[in-house]
Image (cartoon, rainbow, N blue to C red):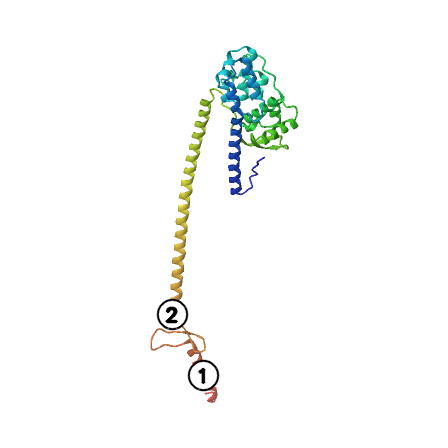
């Protein structure tokens, strides 16, 4: 059972998705291979009874999960005009092809399912459908689970038990586990929230007649939403680029202003240092730029002290 926990590395996730695609292709190919003998046998099933028996066999053996090619063979198609006893087998094969467990239990004509989304009371019931064996019942429930998995909000335990006529949560969990190990889907059982989290479904369900226009409409709607989202992303990217350019210009202007201020400061410091000197003993000298009248601060201070000392030595004169 493959489960992507969301915490693995990109390499592991890529490997997981590649493995999933390979497994899904293998499951589909296995189902087609399992059906092939019955397609060959259908060519010789000339009587309604033989065709009905062939349908029972095809829906009972393991690994047969797609039935469209068998349904399209001429001898199987001829069952539509046979007696109700055998025509019901044709309806049963239709249900196995694209219907669900509810279609079988409600006995609604499959021809009406392609035209309506619900089961109105005015649709007449079909003749009694053939009784399913345990193997057929399990397979139809598994196929029905694949169809239900396309609507995530319906995958609660309560809804699935009702849709599949299962008596308990344990019976539902057993069905989901058997479907997972059969390679039909990838899912997790959330027992706390009482729901089934499906992450992938094998492409094993046949298309109902008339469903292609609806699929095209859904895809066109999805395409238009993608175009709108891309347009919004491009607009947002343009705004981000403009904002980034403005911020870059502001930073460059600030850098230039800081560089100019530093340059002016250095020039100012050079002028101040040029007007000062250092004496013989490291004392700062003040330079008089008057030329011949140049004096130093220390010289002025020294002259005053010598003059006073001379007066004392001369007798206080």
Say what secondary structure mark 2 lies in. Answer: helix
Quadrant where the C terminus sits is bottom left
Query: Taking 249 as reference, is 224 above or below it?
Result: above
Residue hosting label 1 = 306
- Give how far across and how far down residue 83 sits, in percent: 54, 10
Query: Taking 10 as reference, is 266 above or below it?
Result: below
Q: Is residue 32 left or right of residue 250?
A: right
Residue at 50 percent across and 21 percent down: it is 40
- Give how far across and how far down residue 142 sits, in percent: 58, 26
Residue at the far front: name it.
Answer: 44
Residue 222 disc label: none
Query: Taking 267 as reference, is 102 above or below it?
Result: above
Say what secondary structure mark 1 lies in. Answer: helix
Residue hosting label 2 = 274
Quadrant where the N terminus sits is top right
Residue at 43 percent across and 39 percent down: it is 236
Within-10-Å neighbours for mark 1: few <14, some 14–19, many 20+: few
Please name whichever residue, 129 or 160, is drawn nearer the observer in this view of the structure.
129
Q: CA distance from mark 2 to mark 1?
A: 30 Å
Query: Taking 180 as reference, is 213 above or below it?
Result: above
């Amino acid at each position: 059972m493959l489960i992507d926990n969301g915490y693995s590395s990109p390499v592991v996730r890529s490997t997981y998705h590649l493995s999933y695609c390979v497994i899904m292709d293998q499951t589909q190919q296995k189902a087609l291979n399992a059906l092939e003998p019955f397609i060959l046998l259908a060519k010789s099933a000339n009587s309604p009874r033989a065709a009905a028996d062939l349908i029972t066999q095809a829906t009972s053996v393991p690994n047969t999960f797609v039935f469209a090619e068998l349904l399209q063979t001429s001898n199987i198609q001829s069952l539509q005009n046979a007696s109700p006893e055998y025509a019901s087998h044709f309806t049963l094969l239709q249900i196995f092809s694209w219907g669900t467990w509810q279609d079988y239990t409600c006995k609604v004509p499959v021809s009406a399912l392609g035209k309506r989304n619900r089961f109105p009371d005015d649709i007449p019931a079909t003749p009694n459908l053939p009784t399913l064996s345990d193997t057929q019942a399990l397979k139809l429930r598994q196929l029905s689970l694949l169809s239900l998995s396309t609507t995530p909000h319906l995958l609660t335990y309560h809804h699935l038990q009702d849709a599949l006529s299962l008596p308990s949560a344990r019976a539902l969990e057993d069905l989901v586990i058997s479907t997972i190990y059969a390679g039909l889907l990838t899912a997790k059982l959330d027992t706390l929230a009482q729901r089934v989290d499906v992450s992938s479904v094998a492409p094993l369900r046949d298309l109902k007649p008339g469903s292609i226009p609806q699929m095209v409409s859904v895809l066109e709607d999805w395409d238009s939403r993608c175009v709108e989202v891309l347009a919004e992303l491009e607009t947002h990217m343009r705004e981000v680029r403009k904002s980034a350019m403005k911020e870059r210009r502001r930073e460059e202007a600030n850098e230039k202003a800081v560089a100019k201020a530093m340059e002016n400061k250095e020039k100012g410091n050079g002028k101040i240092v040029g007007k000062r000197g250092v004496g013989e003993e490291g004392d700062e000298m003040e330079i008089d730029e008057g030329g011949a009248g140049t004096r130093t601060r220390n010289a002025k201070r020294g002259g005053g002290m010598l003059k006073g000392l001379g007066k004392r030595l001369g007798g206080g004169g």
